Image (tube, rainbow, N blue to C red):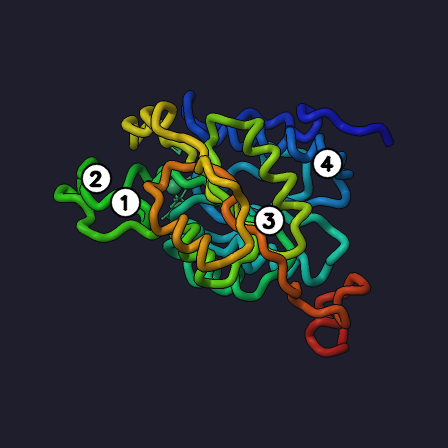
């Protein structure tokens, strides 16, 4: 089969995202990356949770699964372990990945299954009409539920991924789909759990994020580093708006070689009986 174009990795379903939503850029970037990697449709899968961003798999022509809120990573992990021959992409939002799915995020980082996790971080629950999420700035007063701001320190996704053991950590901007596409290719080539935080504006509930276009800049350092202490210093010192692949340091993936060789049925994984 000849290589597919980026457009052929999109489905015929028209996205229902608001005009100007950052998630369009992420969809474009994913499709550009898939085309650049010439991934066959039947060899790839994309798994999401629930949220505006989690609608994305339906807009691609890949096999996919629109899972339960916060559960993209457990489903993607199960799929990759059962079918190690597939390229698995887990995607979702900041609410999906860091609130209800926060515990799965920590354990996916430390388990180190060989998959790519892309979080479209708009610092808000877009789908449920603009409540604060773990990455919402402490003084954000737009939501009626937090009229005096959250008064809580925002979650630092990349620093937390590093502390939890992720081997590949990057931050991107949805307004730069070509840069994000290159990053997705690097993440997919990486052996192990690869995490990309994509700043993807919610134009409807956080119109101030239009300003990201002027504020986003590259880290401007010689990256990626493979030393966790250096990576921690970079991530704790940045303002959250710098982009680049910060850290790449492979370690043994899970499960080990003994279970990597052949695709397994759920029954085999459960102990050798068919269910
Ligand atoms: C178990 C469960 N709890 C709550 C919800 C309601 N809910 C749907 S999407 C969402 C938050 C989505 O936020 P995020 O993941 O950041 O995605 P966005 O819409 O911002 O892209 C919530 C709380 C749900 N669908 N299921
Ligand atoms: S509500 Fe926000 S996140 Fe959802 S589609 Fe609209 S702009 Fe995008
Ligand atoms: Mg969100």
Q: Rounded to the nearest whole Å, what is the CA distance between mark 1 and mark 4?
A: 36 Å
In the rendered structure, the answer to whether residue 101 lies left or right of residue 258 reads left
Q: Name the residue under label 3.
A: 116
Q: Rounded to the nearest whole Å, what is the CA distance between mark 2 and mark 1?
A: 8 Å
Q: In which quarter of the image is residue 191?
A: bottom right
Q: Mark 4 points at which residue?
A: 37
Q: Which of marks 4 and 2 is nearer the N terminus?
A: 4
Q: How crowded is mark 2: few (under 14 residues within 10 Å), some or many (20 or more)?
A: some
- Classify 115 as above or below 131: below
The numbered dot on residue 140 is: 2
Camera-near label (1 vs 4) is 4
Q: Taking the image as four quarters, which one is ligand 2 found in?
A: top left
Q: Which residue lies furthest to the top in this view?
A: 19
Q: Earlier in the sequence, mark 2 or mark 1?
A: 1
Residue 231 in the image, given as x and y percentages of width and height = 46, 53
Q: Rounded to the nearest whole Å, what is the CA distance between mark 4 and mark 2?
A: 40 Å
Q: Mark 1 points at which residue?
A: 132
Q: Residues within 10 Å of mark 1 (few under 14, many from 20)?
A: many
Residue at 25% in and 43% down? 137
Q: Rounded to the nearest whole Å, what is the CA distance between mark 3 and mark 2?
A: 30 Å
Q: Say which quadrant the N terminus sits in.
A: top right
Q: Which of marks 3 and 4 is nearer the N terminus?
A: 4
Q: Dots 2 and 1: beta carbons under 8 Å?
A: yes
Camera-near label (2 vs 1) is 2
- Classify 251 as above or below 242: below
Q: Which residue lies furthest to the left in this view?
A: 148
- Classify 194 as above or below 74: above
Q: How crowded is mark 3: few (under 14 residues within 10 Å), some or many (20 or more)?
A: many
Q: Rounded to the nearest whole Å, what is the CA distance between mark 1 and mark 3?
A: 26 Å
Residue 259 in the image, given as x and y percentages of width and height = 75, 69
């Amino acid at each position: 089969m000849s290589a597919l174009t980026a457009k052929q990795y999109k489905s015929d379903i028209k996205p229902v995202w608001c005009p100007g939503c950052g998630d369009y850029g992420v969809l474009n970037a994913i499709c550009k990356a898939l085309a650049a990697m010439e991934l066959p449709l039947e060899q790839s899968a994309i798994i999401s949770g629930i949220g505006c961003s989690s609608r994305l798999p339906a807009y691609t022509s890949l096999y996919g699964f629109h899972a339960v809120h916060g559960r993209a990573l457990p489903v993607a992990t199960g799929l990759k372990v059962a079918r190690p021959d597939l390229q698995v992409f887990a995607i979702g939002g900041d609410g999906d990945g860091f609130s209800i799915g926060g515990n799965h995020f920590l354990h996916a980082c430390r388990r180190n299954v060989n998959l790519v996790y892309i979080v479209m971080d708009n610092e808000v629950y877009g789908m449920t009409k603009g409540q604060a999420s773990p990455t919402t700035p402490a003084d954000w007063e737009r939501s009626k539920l937090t009229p005096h701001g959250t008064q809580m320190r925002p979650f630092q996704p990349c620093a937390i991924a590093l502390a939890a053991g992720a081997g590949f950590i990057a931050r991107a901007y949805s307004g730069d789909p070509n840069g994000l596409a290159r990053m997705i290719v690097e993440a997919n080539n990486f052996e192990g759990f690869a995490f990309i935080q994509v700043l993807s504006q919610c134009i409807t509930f956080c119109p101030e994020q239009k300003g990201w276009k002027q504020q986003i800049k590259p880290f401007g350092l010689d990256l990626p580093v493979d030393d966790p202490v250096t990576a921690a210093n970079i991530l704790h010192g940045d303002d959250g708006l710098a982009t680049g692949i910060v850290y790449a340091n492979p370690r043994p993936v899970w499960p080990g070689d003994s279970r990597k060789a052949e695709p397994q049925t759920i029954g085999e994984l459960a102990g050798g009986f068919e269910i």
